[in-house]
Amino acid sequence: MSIVDKTSLQLPKENLEAQDFLPLLGTDYIELYVGNAKQAAHYYMSAWGFQPLAYAGLETGLKDRVSYVLQQDKIRIVLTSPLNSGGEINEHINAHGDGVKIIALWVDNAAKSFEETTNRGAEPYYAPKVVKDDDGEVVLSGICTYGETKHVFVERKNYKGAFLPGFKAWNPHYKPTSTGLKYVDHMVGNVGWNEMNKWCKFYEEVMGFAQLVSFDDKDISTEYTALMSKVMSNGNGRIKFPINEPAEGRKKSQIEEYIQFYNGAGVQHIALATDNIIETVTALKNRGVEFLTVPQSYYSEVLNRVGEIDEDLEPLSELGILIDRDDEGYLLQIFTKPILDRPTMFIEIIQRKGAKSFGKGNFKALFESIEREQALRGTL
Ligand code: FE2
């Protein structure tokens, strides 16, 4: 009997044989640039059950920015706001609204990660640097990806502080209960017309990822709108980045709406895994998180499509949780409405019960739901 890592994927043999020149241990953190980090932190704690972890700002010697770091199990998010007018963070917020700036990847060697990727054509974000405080040292380096999004490589084996040097542990009185979110399952990028292949090639050639699956506009289309998607994964399967581009339809694609309001390519959704989606979604709803809904007719047909499942159908249909099956098992998933003012980023909650896919069987019902929301916004 062999023990299989839950997050690993069975890649085709040729991919396993490819040398992993960029071993990734996992997602280290996700940093969003936001208009008001203090209040955003409260939202992610009160609504999502994240715990306070670390803080950097005027009190720690920063002059131009403030960052709050939150954690729930293996998921770490950083919320950063500028303290003055002008500058790079303000420009980012002005262009994109609140959004993901950095997808940080946990590595054993940040200098080598930088060298391997920039040698293969990555545009540098910043060269390797050592940052230190009393708790040890961390090596950081960064490269650019789609839009203004960046990847930062984090080497933290010689560090025992709360988050990164320069941050102090943040221990406020308010510590909400968890909602059962465990780890980042995948993070999806939206890119512009005809750019999907370019960015898949980037992940393949520059970062050593392999393509898991692709969906064309016939898989992902409704009466009105369409998109195309390819899923890129690193060697050990811990990092999965689906990349979407719009496709021609009778009305405006949801990807086009995103690109218009985000003002370019960027992170469309973050999928967070739970071991009990019914409990997690019930808690999130009670705390004010709003989810997309599907018509009840979805549930009268779904078991014919996916076969037997462990859960009762009733709570799933009450909550609007979607079900899909592949060769290896099934999955349960649900999507929030956009969580920011602009109709850009949203969150997916996913529970995998064997399935390693992404819910292809739900695309049509899901996209019709998104279109109903787009119609309300006048952007369909
Ligand atoms: Fe997803």
Image: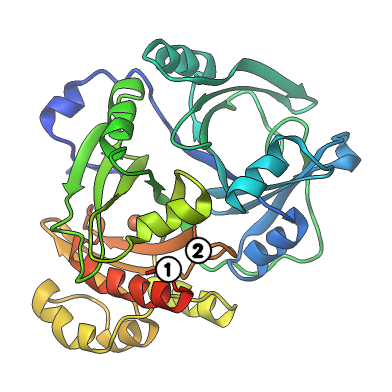
Could one spot residue 270 in this view of the protein? no
Instruction: Kindly state the secondary structure of the residue where label 1 is placed.
Output: loop
Observer-nearest of 188 and 113:
188
Q: Is residue 239 left or right of residue 299?
A: right
Q: Quadrant of the N terminus?
A: top left
Q: Quadrant of ligand 1?
A: bottom left
Query: First in sequence: mark 1 or mark 2?
Result: 2
Instruction: Kindly state the secondary structure of the residue where label 2 is placed.
Output: loop
Observer-nearest of 137 and 197:
197
Q: Which residue is mark 2?
A: 343
Q: How far from the left and from the top, in percent, is residue 43?
A: 66, 66
Could one spot residue 356 in this view of the protein? yes
- CB of residue at label 2: within 8 Å of ligand 1? no
Q: Is residue 111 left or right of residue 57?
A: left
Observer-nearest of 273 and 251:
251
Where residue 356 is drawn, which disc sits there? none
Q: How far from the left and from the top, in percent, is residue 146?
A: 44, 35
Q: Which residue is mark 1?
A: 379
Q: Is residue 187 left or right of residue 316?
A: right
Is label 1 in contact with label 2 (beta carbons under 8 Å)?
Answer: yes
Amino acid, disc 1:
Thr
- Colouring style: rainbow
Q: Is residue 238 left or right of residue 83?
A: left
- CB of residue at label 1: within 8 Å of ligand 1? no
Amino acid, disc 2:
Pro
Q: Residue at x 29, y 34 (%)?
A: 200
Q: Residue at x 74, y 56 (%)?
A: 36
